[in-house]
Amino acid sequence: MRNLLIALLALSPLTVLAATPKIVTLEVPTMTCPVCPITVKNALTHVAGVNSVSVDYEGKTATVMYDAEVTQPDALTKATKEAGYPSTIRK
């Protein structure tokens, strides 16, 4: 039985075992200086489940790739708000 389980796992693609990441873009209108994106990125990076963060200062947005099984967009907006940069989810 154990060998059968090992064989089935070996045949299964690893993507079945890993969660598919989601991407959300946050609007962060209060980024008014070149240092602001550093603070926003730092706040988002510390949210559990966040895989990557890209901040666009000129566009006043932050794009976040995250694991939906670990976190949700509300936790991301909460993190930016607590860092002093309220954000909303771009529709």
Image (spheres, rainbow, N blue to C red):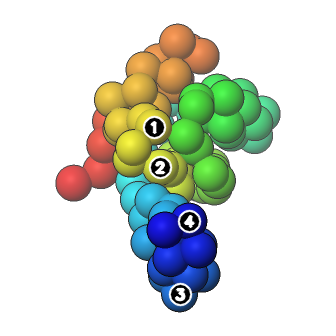
C-alpha distance separating marks 4 and 3? 14 Å
- Sequence order check, earlier mark of 4 and 3: 4
Is the residue 13 above or below the residue 40 in the image? below
Estimate how packed mark 1 is, as few (under 14), some (14 to 19) or many (20 or more) residues with alpha carbons within 10 Å. Answer: few
32 relative to 59 in the view: left or right: right
Quick one: SS at disc 1?
loop
Q: Given the image, on which type of amino acid does mark 4 rest?
A: Arg
Question: Which kind of residue does numbered mark 3 sit on?
Answer: Leu
Q: Residue at x 43, y 65 (%)?
A: 20
Q: Nearer the observer, disc 1 or disc 3?
A: 3
Task: Give how far apart the Cα atoms at labels 2 and 4 are.
Answer: 31 Å
Mark 3 against mark 2, which lies toward the viewer? 3
Q: Are marks 1 and 3 in contact (CB under 8 Å)?
A: no
Q: Which residue is painted at 58% across and 32% down in the image?
A: 48
Q: Residue at label 4? A: 2
Residue at which label 1 appears: 70
Of the residues under marks 1 and 4, which one precedes in the sequence?
4
How far, Cα to Cα, is label 1 from label 4? 30 Å
